Image (tube, rainbow, N blue to C red):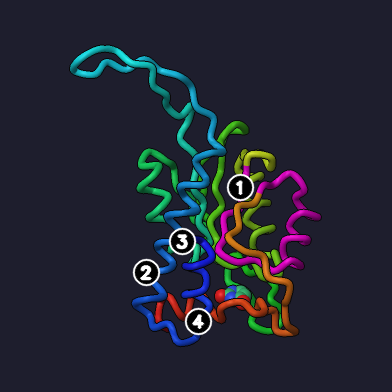
Amino acid sequence: MKDVFLTTLRDRETKTEGFRKAAHQLSGLLAAESSSFLPKMSSLVNSPMASAEGSKLKREPVLVSILRSGLVLLPAFVSLYPGASIGCVGIRRDEKTAAPHLYSSHLPQLRSDDMIFLLDPMVATGQSAELAIRLIKEAGGSEAKIMLVSFLASSKGMAYVKRKAPDVHALIAHVDEGLDANHWIIPGLGDFGDRYFET
Ligand code: URA
């Protein structure tokens, strides 16, 4: 179904309501998929009738959202991981050069064994993701425990992230081949934030 929701997001005829709905549905699928990366342990549970073999997460993950579009992925992840710590990194990209500018950073204290889901629906040049990864590492997180979660990435952007942070994992609904001279993903879906937030 990821391709179905992505098709709705790409379609320039999709109105705000349908765009938001598809974004939330795709976030739900990515959140569900993210759970297979978390270590679990077996635990005995007592039902009203008898005890049974069960399992639970070893640790809740940490969620880091790149503002503002990363906020869109957050509700699906919080509903799956209600005990997760949440960090927000405010990065604005320069409209001409696409260089990332950090305007705010609120990260929890991180442990090297924290699994960190870095949420950003679009990875175009990869520079914002790379900056966020750097901040996460400065806060104590390990590169190998970071998973970048996105709807759409450019192959150039993913190659950049892999070059700068080779141990980072990625959970991306689709990778597009193109990135135009103005740093838009091609075919992409246009400006995700403007379409979602209706600005
Ligand atoms: N951000 C978007 O919203 N769209 C792109 O194509 C690239 C970056």
Q: Which residue is mark 4?
A: 11
Question: Distance from label 1 to label 2 (Cα)?
Answer: 24 Å
Question: Distance from label 1 to label 3 (Cα)?
Answer: 17 Å
The residue depicted at 36 percent of the width and 15 percent of the height is 44
* SS at mark 1 in the image: strand
Closer to the camera in the image, 145 or 88: 145
On whether ligand 1 comes within 8 Å of the CB at mark 3, the answer is no
* SS at mark 2 in the image: helix
**Disc 1: CA contacts within 10 A as few (<14), some (14-19) or many (>=20):** many
In the image, what residue type sits under mark 1?
Answer: Met
Which mark sits nearer the N-terminus, 1 or 4?
Answer: 4
Question: Distance from label 2 to label 3 (Cα)?
Answer: 9 Å
Note whether 17 is above or below 28 in the view shown: below
Asked whether, in this view, residue 143 is left or right of residue 192, the answer is right
Circles 2 and 3: CB distance less than 8 Å?
no
Residue that sits furthest to the top in the current view: 50
The answer to if 140 sits in the magenta stretch is no
Asked whether, in this view, residue 97 is left or right of residue 1, the answer is right
Label at residue 26: 3
Q: Which residue is mark 1?
A: 147
Residue that sits furthest to the bottom in the current view: 13
Which mark sits nearer the N-terminus, 2 or 3?
Answer: 2
Closer to the camera in the image, 164 or 162: 162
Q: Splitting the image into four quadrants, where does ligand 1 fall?
A: bottom right
Residue 90 seen anywhere in this rendered image of the structure: no
Residue interval drawn in magenta: 146-169
Q: Which residue is mark 2?
A: 21
The answer to if 157 sits in the magenta stretch is yes
